[in-house]
Image (cartoon, rainbow, N blue to C red):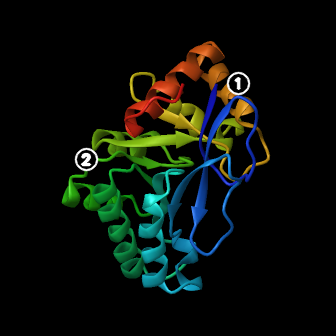
């Protein structure tokens, strides 16, 4: 079985455990998918924030909702960082209250993210999805217990993801399709090639990592 940690594709592929990222104000995934639910920083200007966050909390009772997010901080897109930080902090509190992992979108705001992590000392897993930054930033994050998820940047021969993932063999990580057209099987094949391991071993690693942060069995 493949685990697709984060996808915007509203469909389920055979033999895939996929988590559809639902941002309040946008369509849901299909009924067969599990969900992560949050207010994406890009969507903050499009909605009434209090109503959106109330909807996020209301959805915590839905058994399909297994994670919170994606939420986060983006220095290059959206409203002010001060507003983004306030909204992000609300997601952190919901993550802790409802014991669900936090899926994070972070662009050029890692200092703020790390400061928030130190301030809250969360019990739930924090995962930066679509990680494309350098090994220095990766080490700063994992040293503070923040996990990483990799996707289409693995196919970029000059990208950071392949360099970073080679340093992650003893640290839990995840694989995802995000909004790309590639399949999760293709992502696994590429990651297995980069790591020089069998795809089946990688599948078992991803299942184990997901079960650990969700505190539940997948199969």
Q: Residue at x 39, y 22 (%)?
A: 170
State which quadrant residue 169 falls in.
top left
**116 to the left or right of 209:** left
Q: Secondary structure at mark 1?
A: helix
Viewer-side label of 2, 1: 2
**What is the C-alpha distance between the residues marked 2 and 1?**
32 Å
Taking the image as drawn, is residue 76 in sight?
Answer: no
Rendered view: 181 above or below 195? below
Q: Position of residue 68 (x, y in %)?
A: 45, 57
**181 to the left or right of 26:** right
Q: Residue at x 22, y 59 (%)?
A: 120
Q: Position of residue 87 (x, y in %)?
A: 39, 74
Label 2 vs 1, first from the N-terminus: 2
Q: Which mark is residue 123?
A: 2
Q: Residue at x 49, y 57 (%)?
A: 62
Q: Which residue is mark 1?
A: 189
């Amino acid at each position: 079985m493949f685990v697709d940690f984060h996808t915007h594709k509203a469909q389920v592929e055979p033999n895939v455990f996929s988590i559809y990222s639902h941002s309040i104000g946008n369509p849901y995934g299909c009924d067969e998918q599990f969900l992560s639910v949050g207010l994406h920083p890009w969507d903050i200007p499009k909605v009434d924030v209090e109503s959106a966050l109330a909807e996020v909390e209301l959805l915590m009772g839905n058994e399909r909702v297994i994670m919170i997010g994606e939420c986060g901080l983006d220095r290059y897109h959206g409203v002010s960082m001060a507003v983004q930080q306030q909204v992000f902090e609300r997601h952190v509190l919901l993550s802790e209250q409802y014991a669900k992992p936090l899926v994070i979108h972070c662009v050029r705001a890692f200092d703020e993210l790390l400061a928030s992590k130190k301030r809250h000392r969360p019990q739930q897993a924090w995962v930066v999805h679509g990680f494309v930054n350098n090994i220095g930033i990766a080490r700063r994050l994992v040293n503070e217990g923040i996990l990483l998820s990799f996707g289409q940047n693995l196919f970029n021969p000059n990208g950071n993801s392949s360099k970073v993932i080679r340093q992650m063999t003893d640290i839990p990580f995840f694989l995802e399709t995000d909004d790309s057209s590639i399949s999760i099987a293709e992502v696994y094949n590429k990651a297995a090639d980069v790591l020089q391991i069998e795809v089946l071993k990688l599948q078992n690693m991803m299942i184990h990592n997901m079960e650990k942060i969700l505190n539940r069995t997948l199969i």
